[in-house]
Amino acid sequence: MSILFKNAQIIDPTADDVTTRDLMVRDGKIVDPSGKAETVIECSGKYLAPGIVDIGVKVCEPGERHKESYKTAGAAAAAGGVTTIVTRPDTDPAIDTPEALEFIRRRAAEVAPVNVLHIAALTKGRAGREMTEIGFLQDAGAVAFSDGYRVVQNTKVLARAMVYAKSLGALIIAHPQEPILSYGGVATSGKFASLRGLPHVSPMAERMGLDRDISMIEMTGAAYHADQITTARALPALERAKKNGLNITAGTSIHHLTLNEFDIADYRSFFKMTPPLRSEDDRIAMVEAVSAGLIDIISSQHTPQDEESKRLPFEAAASGAVGLETFLPAVLRLYHSGHLSLNQIFRAASFNPAKRLGLNSGRLDIGAPADLMLFDADVPYVLNRDDLHSKSKNTPFDEARLQGKVLRTFVGGQEVYRA
């Protein structure tokens, strides 16, 4: 099967500019645009980009299927232009054995229309006491290892896991926080949190957690990715670690790039995140760090929560928000405001995460998989959370004015979504 995308504005994450040209797909791969195609799609100047590779998506199978299943998460991803989701292991029970991993791999392959890769737990039960069988889990298909938002407090356990991971070439994904200092905090320390009477945590908790992890990377030589850097105070340490040649990358969430602490003013629990939303100065610093390439990856940190978990007082409500379907319009806020170019956005949302995981996707090179999204960056609309494909509807963008919609999504050259 062959498809010719005509007159598309091509967003190549490895280039500096958007170009208008044709793109050809044959047998699921991007090929040289010559010869005839069985199907011609007239793009009429709409944008064609590599599909998003989203690291850190929570799918609630097994254990909490009422919040999100692989079927609904896959549908939400396709509608959001996310062609590869990389799932977290913080399920109930945790994905900490080859058997559990095999179960969710089969489940995802049966029902999800997009590519699904899996992160396995770093320690058994994500309890931080004993490392998992990293080698067996890697053989079973795990692409990285993480305890999710739980910090491994025992540095001896973490050191052993990192040394073992290094010997296998495995990637460790961690959540940089000082766990004692950050325990119970639902807002970022400052005058605003105090006025709202909310338990708060200093941004230094993130800096302290990152400093510790950087020391561990220096000691063990492990490959490491920080899932979310959200405060300016952590950036100098990250920059030094990179300049010193450590095998470290960092990500941030789309919510921390587009929202700030003032959004919790009305105690709306849809804005309760982990880490909590930061100051406007921190938000701007994160955007600038993405622009400069210091922060490598943007992710949705898609975390479904049901109504019973969210319809509680702010302090008691569950943390997290869904983000697969709102990833594109949210990040396009930064494009329309002039803070990031489209090439920079897709470098952080597609190319860099694929590169970190050793994938051939996230790019538009000849021979790359035809995982693509066609979208209109300018169409305005008001989001209705009931229209989302996710089972859980806990989006902070409910009733928000957004700009930009996915028109069509392709995975391996097969159309999996059409608006």
Image (cartoon, grey):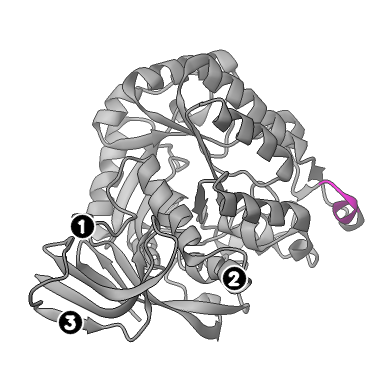
- Counting from the top left corner in percent of width and height, residue 255 is at 61, 59
Q: Earlier in the sequence, mark 1 or mark 2?
A: 2
Q: Is residue 190 magenta?
A: yes
Q: Earlier in the sequence, mark 3 or mark 1?
A: 3
Q: Label 1's element?
A: loop
- How crowded is the residue under tag 1: few (<14 C-alpha within 10 Å), some, or many (20+)? some
Position of the N terminus by quadrant: bottom left
Residue at image mark 2: 333
Q: Quadrant of the C terminus?
A: bottom left
Q: Nearer the viewer, residue 408 or 192?
A: 408
Residue 339 image position (x, y, % from top left): 62, 64
Element at label 2? helix
| Residue 273 numbered tag | none
The residue that appears at 21% across and 61% down in the rendered structure is 412
Q: Main secondary structure of the magenta part?
A: helix
> Whole-percent x and y of residue 265?
80, 65
| Amino acid type assigned to the residue bearing label 3 in the image | Val
- Nearest-to-viewer mark from 1 and 2: 1
User: Which span is picked out in magenta?
Assistant: 189-194
Q: Quadrant of residue 119?
A: top left
**Residue drawn where x is 74% and y is 57% of the image:** 314
Q: Say above or below: 298 vs 169.
A: below
Q: Which residue is mark 3?
A: 40
Query: Looking at the image, can residue 406 be seen?
Result: yes
Q: Say which residue label 1 marks.
A: 366
Earlier sequence position, callout 2 versus callout 3: 3
